[in-house]
Image: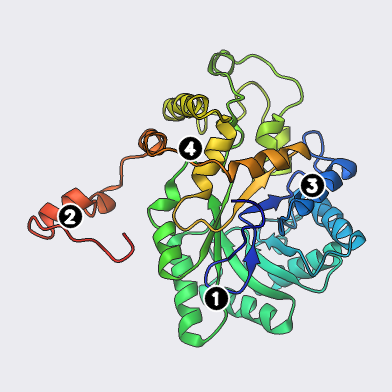
C-alpha cells in the first residue's frame, strides 16, 4: 500500500490517500515548523502522491491555514488536493468565538476560506461537540454550507456517538447531506472508539480518520521510562515527537513542561506494557516502533485514512513506509492483546463467548459485520 492506493471516504465520492497530512505544526511557535520547513513537508507529501491535507482554524491561530493556502496556490494544486479544515474550538475570546451554533460556524468557515485562498473546502469538520447546540440546528447549518458551495462534504470529530447517530439519522430522514466521516483519537494506547464509534461508522457508512496514531509520540519508542519517572528536566517544552501530532493545541506547549508532559494520562503501566511489546514486535519484524504502530492503526476495521503529524520532510517517507508493513498473525495478536481493555458491562454481555451462553442458549451466532 502507498499514498496512491486511494479509497473513498465513507459512502461518498470523495477519493483520498490512506495517509492524510496533518498541518497542526505549520506555523506553531517553539515546537512547530516554520514556513520553509512546512513547505518542504507539504511538497514531500504531494510529490509522493498524497492528496488529503487537514488543517483547522485554531492551528497556530490561523497561520496553518494561511501557509497551506499559499503552498497550494503557488503550485496550482487546488483541483488535485482534498482540502479539509475544522471549526468548533474557540478561535478567540467571547461567547461567539467557538461552538457549533450557526453564527460561530459560519464566521469560522468564512475566515478559513479567506486564509486558505479558496472559495470552498472539500471536507469541513465539526472539530468538537459544544454540548448545547441541537443536532437539528447543526445539521441545517452544514446542509446550508453544502448548498452554498462553500463545502462539498462534512464530518464529525470529538463528539459522542449518540449525537452523531442523531445527526446521521435526521439527515437520512430529511434527505439532507449527513456526515461522511469521523475523526477521533485512535491508537494502540487508546482504543475507546471501538466500543461505539467504530460500529457507528459501519452502520452509517462513515469513514474513520484517526488522529494521533502514535499517541503523542509515545509509540515512536522515543520515551525512556526511567527518565520520565525520574522527572529529569528537558529543554524546549513539548517534545517534537509529541508536538508533531494532531490535536495537541499550540497553547499546550506553555504548560507541558518537564520530563512527563502528560501527567497520569499517557505514561501508565498499561501504556508502558504496550511500548514494551511494540518494541519487541518491531525488532522481530525489522521495523521501527513508529512504523509498526502506524501500520496497526491503518489496517483497523473502518479506517479509511490516518492523520500523520510530521515536523520534518524526511518523516513523510518514513510514514509512507508504514503502509507497506504487514504484521504476522503472531505479532498482530500480541499487539491486540496487550492493548486490549476490559469491556464495559454493556459490551461484555455481547462478547462472542458470553453471548453464546447467556443469549443464544449455547449456540454460536455471528452478526453480518463480524
Seen in the image, is 290 located left or right of residue 251?
Answer: left
**Quarter the C terminus occupies:** bottom left
Q: Front-most of 133 and 326?
A: 326
Q: Earlier in the sequence, mark 1 or mark 2?
A: 1
Residue at numbered disc 3? 44
Seen in the image, is 351 located left or right of residue 255?
Answer: left
Q: Earlier in the sequence, mark 1 or mark 4?
A: 1
Tag nearer the camera, 4 or 3: 3
Q: Secondary structure at mark 4?
A: loop
Cα separation between marks 4 and 2: 27 Å
Q: Earlier in the sequence, mark 4 or mark 3?
A: 3
Residue that appears at 70% across and 19% down: 234
Cα separation between marks 1 and 4: 30 Å
Bin the neighbour count of mark 2 within 10 Å (Cα to Cα): few under 14, some 14-19, many 20 and up: some
Assess whether mark 3 and mark 1 are in contact (beta carbons under 8 angstroms). Answer: no
Q: Earlier in the sequence, mark 1 or mark 3?
A: 3
- The x, y position of residue 176, in whole percent, is 55, 83
Q: Secondary structure at mark 2?
A: helix
Residue that appears at 71% across and 61% down: 85
Tag nearer the camera, 1 or 3: 3
Cα separation between marks 1 and 2: 33 Å
Residue at numbered disc 2? 355
Residue at numbered disc 4? 189
Q: Is residue 223 above or below residue 186?
A: above
Q: Earlier in the sequence, mark 4 or mark 2?
A: 4
Q: Which picture quadrant has residue 87?
A: bottom right
Q: Is residue 258 above or below residue 195?
A: above
Amino acid at each position: 500500500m502507498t499514498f496512491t492506493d486511494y479509497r473513498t471516504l465513507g459512502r461518498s465520492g470523495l477519493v483520498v490517500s490512506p495517509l492524510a497530512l496533518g498541518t497542526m505544526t505549520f506555523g506553531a511557535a517553539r515546537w512547530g515548523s516554520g514556513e520553509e520547513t512546512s513547505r518542504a513537508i507539504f511538497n514531500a507529501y504531494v510529490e509522493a502522491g498524497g492528496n488529503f491535507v487537514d488543517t483547522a482554524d485554531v492551528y497556530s491561530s490561523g497561520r496553518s491555514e494561511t501557509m497551506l493556502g499559499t503552498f497550494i496556490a503557488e503550485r496550482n494544486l487546488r483541483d488535485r488536493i482534498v482540502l479539509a479544515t475544522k471549526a468548533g474550538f474557540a478561535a478567540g475570546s467571547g461567547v461567539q468565538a467557538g461552538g457549533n451554533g450557526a453564527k460561530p460556524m459560519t464566521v469560522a468557515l468564512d475566515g478559513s476560506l479567506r486564509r486558505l485562498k479558496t472559495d470552498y473546502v472539500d471536507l469541513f469538520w465539526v472539530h468538537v461537540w459544544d454540548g448545547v447546540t441541537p443536532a437539528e440546528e447543526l445539521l441545517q447549518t452544514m446542509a446550508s454550507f453544502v448548498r452554498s458551495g462553500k463545502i462539498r462534504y462534512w464530518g464529525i470529530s470529538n463528539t459522542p456517538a449518540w449525537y452523531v447517530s442523531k445527526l446521521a439519522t435526521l439527515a437520512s430522514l430529511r434527505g439532507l447531506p449527513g456526515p461522511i466521516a469521523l475523526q477521533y483519537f485512535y491508537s494502540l494506547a487508546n482504543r475507546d472508539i471501538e466500543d461505539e464509534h467504530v460500529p457507528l461508522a459501519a452502520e452509517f457508512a462513515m469513514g474513520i480518520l484517526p488522529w494521533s496514531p502514535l499517541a503523542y509520540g509515545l509509540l515512536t519508542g522515543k520515551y525512556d521510562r526511567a527518565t520520565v519517572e525520574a522527572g529529569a528536566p528537558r529543554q524546549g517544552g513539548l517534545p517534537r515527537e509529541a508536538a508533531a501530532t494532531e490535536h495537541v493545541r499550540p497553547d499546550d506547549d506553555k504548560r507541558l513542561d518537564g520530563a512527563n508532559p502528560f501527567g497520569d494520562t499517557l505514561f501508565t503501566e498499561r501504556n508502558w506494557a504496550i511500548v514494551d511489546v511494540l518494541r519487541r514486535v518491531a525488532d522481530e519484524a525489522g521495523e521501527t516502533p513508529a512504523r509498526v504502530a502506524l501500520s496497526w492503526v491503518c489496517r483497523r476495521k473502518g479506517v479509511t485514512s490516518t492523520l500523520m503529524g510530521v515536523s520534518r520532510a524526511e518523516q513523510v517517507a518514513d510514514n509512507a513506509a508504514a503502509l507497506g508493513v504487514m504484521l504476522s498473525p503472531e505479532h498482530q495478536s500480541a499487539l491486540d492483546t496487550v492493548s486490549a481493555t476490559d469491556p464495559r458491562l454493556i459490551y461484555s454481555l455481547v462478547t462472542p463467548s458470553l453471548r453464546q451462553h447467556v443469549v443464544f442458549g449455547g449456540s454460536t451466532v455471528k452478526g453480518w459485520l463480524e
